Structure formats: C-alpha cells, structure tokens
Amino acid sequence: MRRRHEGQGLFSYPTPFTPPTTEDDRLSWLRLIRSRRVGVATFYRLLGEHGSAGAALAALPDLARAAGVEGYECCPEGVALAELRAARKAGARMICRGETGYPAGLALISDPPPVLWAIGDAGLLARPMVALVGARNASSLGLRMARRLAEGLAGAGVTVVSGLARGIDTAAHQAALAGGTVAVLAGGADVVYPAENAALAADIALRGLCLSEQPLGLVAQARHFPLRNRIIAGLSRAVVVVEAAAQSGSLITARQALEQGREVLAVPGHPFDGRASGCNMLIRDGAALVRGPDDVLAALEIAAPAAPAGNPPAQAAGVRPAVGRTAAAAPEASIAEAPPPSRQDQAGLHRQILDRLGPSPVAEDQLLRDLSLSPATAAPELLTLELDGLIRRAPGGLLSRA
C-alpha cells in the first residue's frame, strides 16, 4: 500500500534553508526548538522568515507580544548548554537537519525534527531501513514472526527500526541487534520506557542506535508517542505491521507512513484474533501481505542474501532467542532453572499464557520457551486452564486459546 506524497516543497519561505555552520548556530537551533510555543512547523517558519535561528530568537518576544502573549522568554542559553552537557555525559551526538549524517528519508517528510540526539552507531542511518511495529501484548506466533522478519532483514543489510515498546518492538530489536537496529524513543534518548527494556536499550546503544528528538532526560508523555511514530515511519522505506488491533498505535504509524509516501506491509492473522484485526484491515485496503522477510525485500527490490551451502536456516534448526533473553543465553538452561510459581503468581502466570495464545495453534514447547517456563512448572497451569475451558489442545502438542 502506498500513497504518493504530493505536498509542496518543505521550505517554501523567502529565505533559503541552511543548516547550522558553527557551534553558536547549533546552540541557537537548540534554543529555538526548545522555546515555549515553538513546535517543528513554527521552527521552520521562523527560520525561513528570519534567515537564522539567532535572528528568530531575537524576534520571538516581539512576535509573542503581538500575538497577545506578555512576558514571553525564549529558552535560556543556560538551559540549552545544560542539555549539551547532559548529551556529552550520555555519549549522545547532536544531528541537525541538513548536516551530514541526518537521515535522508526523514529529511523529506513534512515535519522533520530539526534536532536529533543519537546514542550509538549513527552510521546505521545511512543504510536502507524498514520499520517493524506491532502489538505490545503480542501472541507467541506474532513474536516468532517478528524475530524471523528482523533476522532476515538485518541479514540482508537492512536496518530494523522500531520503538522499544513491549511485545513486537522488543522481539524485533533483539533479533536484529547483531545486524543493525535503531530504537526511536518517545522520551529522551537516554530514558528507557518501559523500564524492563533497560538492558536491551544498553545493548542497542553499544551495538545499534538509540534516537530521539526530545531533550536528554525527558520522561515521555502520551503526546510524545505519535511524534515518535512519525520518526519511525519517516526513517523507513517501508513499515511492516506484525500484529495490531483495529485501534492501535501501530496503525497510526502505518497511516503516517502512507502520508509520507512509504510502503506499508502487514502480516495476516486469524480472523478471530483481535490482535490481527488491524493487519487484516490493512491487507484488505491494499497493503502487501507478508509471509516472511523475502516478501519485504522483494517489495523494496533488495536482493535476499544467499544461504550458505549445507547450513539449514535458523528457523528450521529451531535456533531462535526467546523474548526477554539474549541470544547467547541457552534456552534449555534458562527453562531448567526457572523456579515454580508461587500461589500468588499463578493468576499472573495464567494471564501471561493466555496473552501469548490466540485462535491459531502454537506448539507447546515454543510457548514454554517464550515464557521461560519449565515443563514441570507449566504442566499443571496448562491443565488448569484446559479444565477451565480457556485453552484447547490439538494433536501434535499444539495449544490455542478457546
């Protein structure tokens, strides 16, 4: 599914757009975008009308007074300098729009961030990028699909982009970490949400890239997530939705991708599974159906890597890291060492099991790997859920949600 971006030129203002050329210019850019009531659109309008961020800062108080805002003050220089010091401490690099290293695709959207903070390997932004997004309460099948797609795309030299959320995002980042992944954060590039992904974020900062337009140290608010989603779509040549309900943030990202003229693809799901309803709607409306990474690579006209002779693919060999653990961890050892749940934990464990199951059957051993459960721990809980009529067993060790 693709919609052509037919908007007018990004900077149709009297003064041609030029990126900052000195450290003072960069400081002025930061002060301007951090000033009260200055959003991205206002930033570019002021820059176009006044020629530079410094001139725009000088004019802002008078402009605010003319608009009826008394006592207006621009972002103080000390606040911007403190942000620069925090960035140095966090190892973050400031990338302004128009500078070398700013993502070319992102620069073409209607509202590109004037300033990005990057922690990690900014060289990943120069590679072809594909976004993988989906449900936070992902099913076991959805997580497996996200890992398969991320591994295949990263293996083909594609940078996998996602938002570091629970579920599909987490699985995509983990599976693509060795090949290249970018986590776009809604808050500051040094602020991890959810907190349970702190270790994953640290790994991405070392081996991939954490990216944000927000100030360092900012804790994300609800309004920041749609802004984050436009960056995910803007970075990417295509957005692949793995699992998404009919009303979800993943569909917001897909819609923004369409508005930006990007490809939108979706993984189909069972009609009775609410987590697949959004994907099925996208496919009905013209999104390309995705069965594996080759479908995504074909849509983008990227050659798939040749498999080494004599080596079976990781999926056939059953080698796939479980969510919440690194690939280096031995699944068997983790399962064997998992303690049995206490009575207080049983209700929570039942919810976890049911969240990972849907109408489509899943192999029991795969479910146990995803939840890091031993067979001895899981067996009585599965039996209880089966007797309660909440899950069904099928031949071949398959489970589904009733």
Image (tube, grey):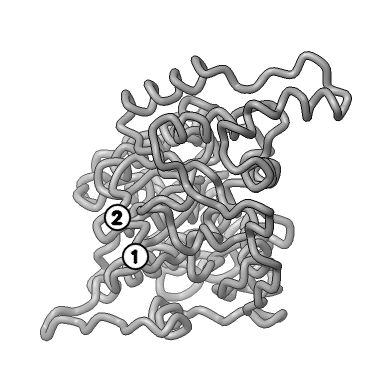
Q: In this view, does 210 lie above or below 143?
A: above
- The answer to whether residue 179 shows anywhere in this view is yes
Q: Mark 1 near mark 2, Cβ–Cβ under 8 Å? A: yes
In the image, residue 310 sits, relative to residue 19, either above or below, namely below
Percent of width and height locating residue 249: 65, 53
Could you say which disc has been placed on residue 123 in the image? 2
Question: In what element is the residue under mark 2?
Answer: helix
* Rendered-image quadrant of the N terminus: bottom right
| Residue drawn at x 32%, y 47% as measured from the top left | 374
Q: Report x, y in % for residue 258.
A: 65, 70
Q: Where is residue 307 in the image (x, y as percent from the top left)?
A: 20, 82
130 or 107, nearer to the observer: 107
Residue 240 in the image: above or below residue 63: below
**Quick check: 171 left or right of 115?**
left
Instruction: In the rendered view, tell whether residue 190 sits above or below residue 259.
Output: above
Separation of residues labelled 1 and 2 (CA atoms): 8 Å
Is disc 2 surrounded by few (<14), some (14 to 19) or many (20+) residues within 10 Å? few
Relative placement, left or right, of 371 versus 208 is: right
Give the tally of numbered discs. Answer: 2
| Residue 379 in view, yes or no | no
Q: Which mark is residue 258?
A: none
Residue 127: which disc? 1
Three-letter amino acid code at the position of disc 1: Arg
**Left or right of residue 115, residue 313 in this image:** left
Q: Which of 65 and 329 is in front in this view?
A: 65
Please tell me whether mark 1 sits on a helix, a strand or a loop: loop
Residue shown at the point (43%, 29%) measured from the top left: 24
**Toward the viewer: 325 or 215?**
215
The residue lying at 35 percent from left, 55 percent from top is 181
Residue type highlighted by circle 2: Gly
Q: Where does the C terminus fall, quadrant-wise?
A: bottom right
Residue 104 location, x and y as percent? 45, 62
